Image (spheres, rainbow, N blue to C red):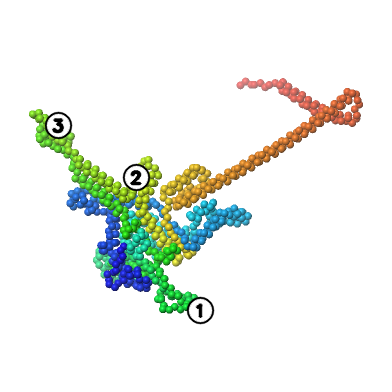
Amino acid sequence: MPDLQPYTNPGSKTYKDFILDTSIKSKLDPEYGLRIAKDIEQKYSAGVANGYMFLRNQRFKENLLWASGKINVYSRFGDLVGLNAKINYANINWKAPMLVNRIISGLVGRWMNRREKIQVTAVDPLSVAAKNEQYEQAEFILYNRKQLEALEQESGVPMVAPDQFVAEDKDDLEAWSVLGNRLPEEIKYELGTNNILESQGYFDVLKEKLLWDSATYGLVGTYVWMDEYGVIHVEWVDPLSVFYSYSKFEDFRDTSMRGFVKSLTISEIRRKYGKQFGGKLTEEQIFKIAQVSKDFQRFDKLAWNYEWNLSYIRPYDEYNVEVIYFWIKSVDEETALATVTKQHKSTIVQRGVPAPESLGDNQEFINRDHWNLYKGVYIREAMEILEWGLDNNMIRSQDPQETGDVEFPISLYMYQNTDMRNIALPEKVEEPVEGMCLAKLKMQQLIATMVPAGAAINWDALQEVGLGLASDGETAIEPQKLYEQTGKLYYRGRDAEGNPLPLPITELQNAGFIAQMNGLIANYQFNYSVLKDDLGEDPNLITQAMQPRVTSDNVQASQQAAAFATDYMYNGYSNIMTQTAKKVACLLNNSVRFGASAYRHLMNEEDVKDRNFSTLFRFLPDQFEIQEMVLQMNQALAANPALIQYLDPFKLKRIAKEDVKLAELYLRNAMKKMIRSEEVKAQQAAEQNAQVQAMAAQQKAEGDMQLLQVQNQMKALEISEQSKAKKEELVLGGYFDLLKAGVQMPAEMKAIINQLVPNITMPLVQGNQQMIQGIMSESQEEEAPQPQMQPQ
């Protein structure tokens, strides 16, 4: 926007004077605010035909007509197709083309499938120290896990808290420190910020509105404010109603003035500025404001009635008036005199005092620059200033690097900002769309004026045709009707003198229509190719990509190429949401910290006290990233069936919808657990196998030892028996030798022989008797009669 010129009222202060003025006291004068409002209104007014806002809105309205399919085709193309404003081509369809609407609808529909969320990070020293402490605790547990487990077993006291993160290895710890090391305050704050935006439709209804504005106008805006109850409101700002000072940046970061025009009902004005609600307007003053409304002119003009001071319902309550909201950022001087008392050594600060001529030993004069934001609310038609002064809820950044700076409650973004102008989608494709529209109209005109297929009739030759009689036998045959109805023609090739006769009727082909129609179709296709070049993508890309034998990779590549060409429009939405989320987070901090109860169900004062939060507009994974993650999981499960014992597929899918990196971390940790578990199982199996082999070897050795012992015992018994038998043999042999020699045996030898002989003979006799009894019993069984079988 060009620099604002001084207001025409001589001696009045203007917007430029306000920027240069550093005195807060003089700026707070309501008359000062009224003059600034008139100066701004004059430059914003659409009556300034050469002004920036007028030319911008003219282009915006043109874009809106193309995008909504409401362009006046007859007035725009009537002369180009050679019409004379008469109804001479009633069959021509003058309906506006929907091609631009189709392109924008397709883009917005594609962008609506993307999912986003606000991510909050605590950046204050207290939170950073708490995160570092959590990291050090997790690192200590990682390197001293065995000692802690041993202490826990010996003492019976848990050494690790139940909610403490325990890393598997160093890589797991580093990944957690980046992705998972979050404070409870961050989670609560993030939940509150997302709830505020989601409850007001900025992830569904208003998201679609902002995306449509980005494609149609190339300018998007929001308005963030907090009411007296601490409730945060986020309003959509119509690009046609917003105004601003000059800026070189797409996010208007260097603007010093922003505002917009909004329509308010009289009841809304009363609720905000009426005396009965703490304002300054009396009911009679409100009635005078209602008189400038357009609604007031539609009915019989009302006269003031004193009874309306006490009425609940008034006939003008729903009248609408245009109100200008504007904010001006200014650098002001803040002065203060600090005095240290001599008796108690306490400091007394006096603010807003001028610089004294001399200072005492215990005094210090402080003079510093400070950013402030002034807010004005001005009724255009009534030229009444409703509100002027320092903004009650100034949004100051929580980022330590921007301490003291103040943010506009209005967030604006215009992509490809070049000298405060850009090219939105309708303007970008206007030229080829006009060519396509003209080609379609010329086709309709060609069809409407097309000459039907006819025939050339040689009248002289036709007279020579011998006319016969019709079926009734009385009426002559008409050759032309016969030809038109049957396509047959009977004629003589020679006359009575024998001269050849030409064809009486010759068909005429309308070849000119075909050539012209083909030319118009080629022109339409040419303009369509120009549209694709200007747009950077084919509006029918998905239809072509989904043809048979086209892989999913080609579809994804085609969509990615299209996204590169048009996603700068979607970036308008992402950037405006980044600015909006930052301001919502600042006001949420103020609302909770100053005791409002609107968001106490989410957090308390302790959660935000001495803490600063930074916001980031983060894109959630799209369908291709989620599908790739699921494919990796399926491949891992197919290669390692045992992985299912350590991995929950449904949990991984839920994580992947929020953060693919966390899903990858979860999958990697599950695979690590599986590998470690399999290694432990293999080691245990090897140890168990070794134990079994050792036990088998030990048992074999013990069996061999027992067998050897038995063998030794049997061998010793055998030797003993053999020795005993040998002794008996020797004794008996000597006994029989003595008997043969007739030598008298000593008495002691007789006693031995008497004991020895029965021991030898008795077992022999018993064995012989048992053998005889056995033979006899077998012979008796054989002699016993066999039972005879009875006949059946």
Q: Is disc 2 surrounded by few (<14), some (14 to 19) or many (20+) residues within 10 Å?
A: few
**Image quadrant assignment for residue 41:** bottom left
Is there a contact, CB below 8 Å, between mark 1 and mark 2?
no
In space, the residues marked 3 and 1 are separated at their CA atoms by 137 Å
Question: Which comes before the other along the chain, label 2 or label 3?
Answer: 3
The label number, if any, that marks residue 490 in the structure image: 3
Q: Residues within 10 Å of mark 3 (few under 14, many from 20)?
A: few
Seen in the picture, residue 507 relative to 769 is either above or below; the reply is: below
Q: x, y (%) of residue 469? A: 11, 32
Which of 84 and 13 lies nearest the eye of the viewer? 13
Q: Is residue 566 visible from the viewing direction of this image?
A: yes
The secondary structure type at the circle numbered 3 is: loop
Q: Which residue sits at x=34%, y=60%?
A: 248
Q: Secondary structure at mark 1?
A: loop
Q: Nearer the viewer, mark 3 or mark 1?
A: 1
Q: Is residue 283 left or right of residue 599?
A: left
Q: Position of residue 473 (x, y in %)?
A: 11, 31
Q: Say which amino acid is labelled 2.
A: Thr
Position of residue 446 measured from the top left corner of the image (x, y, whole percent): 21, 45
Residue type marked 1: Gln
Residue position for label 1: 343
